[in-house]
Image (spheres, helix red, strand yellow):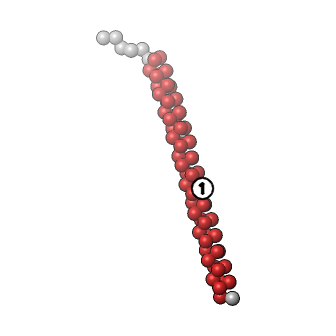
Amino acid sequence: MEKDIANYIRRHTLLVTTVVTVAFLVLAAGEYYLYRKIMTVNRQVSEGTMQIQDAINGLKPTPMQ
């Protein structure tokens, strides 16, 4: 009976440890994926901002010297 209980506790502990480890790996992968998407969006916003600034600067008359 003691062996059965010890075996059950060992299997349960292993199962819980495995589930927690897999959950952390999935969360880490999700964080990395979101980080990459945020960097892509930041790059697109930066490029759009530069294009707007170029368009605005192109409309301003340049002072003649």
Q: Nearer the viewer, residue 12 or 37?
A: 12
The residue positioned farthest toward the top in the image shown: 64
- The quadrant the C terminus occupies is top left
How many numbered marks, from 0 up? 1
Q: Position of residue 61 (x, y in %)?
A: 42, 14
Task: Say above or below: 30 vs 18.
Answer: above
Q: Which residue is mark 1?
A: 26
Task: Say above or below: 9 vs 40.
Answer: below
Badge 1 amino acid:
Val
- In the image, taking residue 9 as reference, residue 31 lies left or right, namely left
Q: Position of residue 63 (x, y in %)?
A: 36, 14
The residue positioned farthest toward the left in the image shown: 65
Q: Nearer the viewer, residue 20 or 47?
A: 20
Q: Position of residue 50 (x, y in %)?
A: 47, 28
Q: Quadrant of residue 6?
A: bottom right
Q: Position of residue 42 (x, y in %)?
A: 51, 38
Q: Nearer the viewer, residue 62 or 43?
A: 43
Which residue lies at the image location 60% right of the left edge and 56% below the top edge? 26
Q: Quadrant of residue 8?
A: bottom right
Which residue lies at the image location 62% right of the left edge and 65% below the top edge? 19
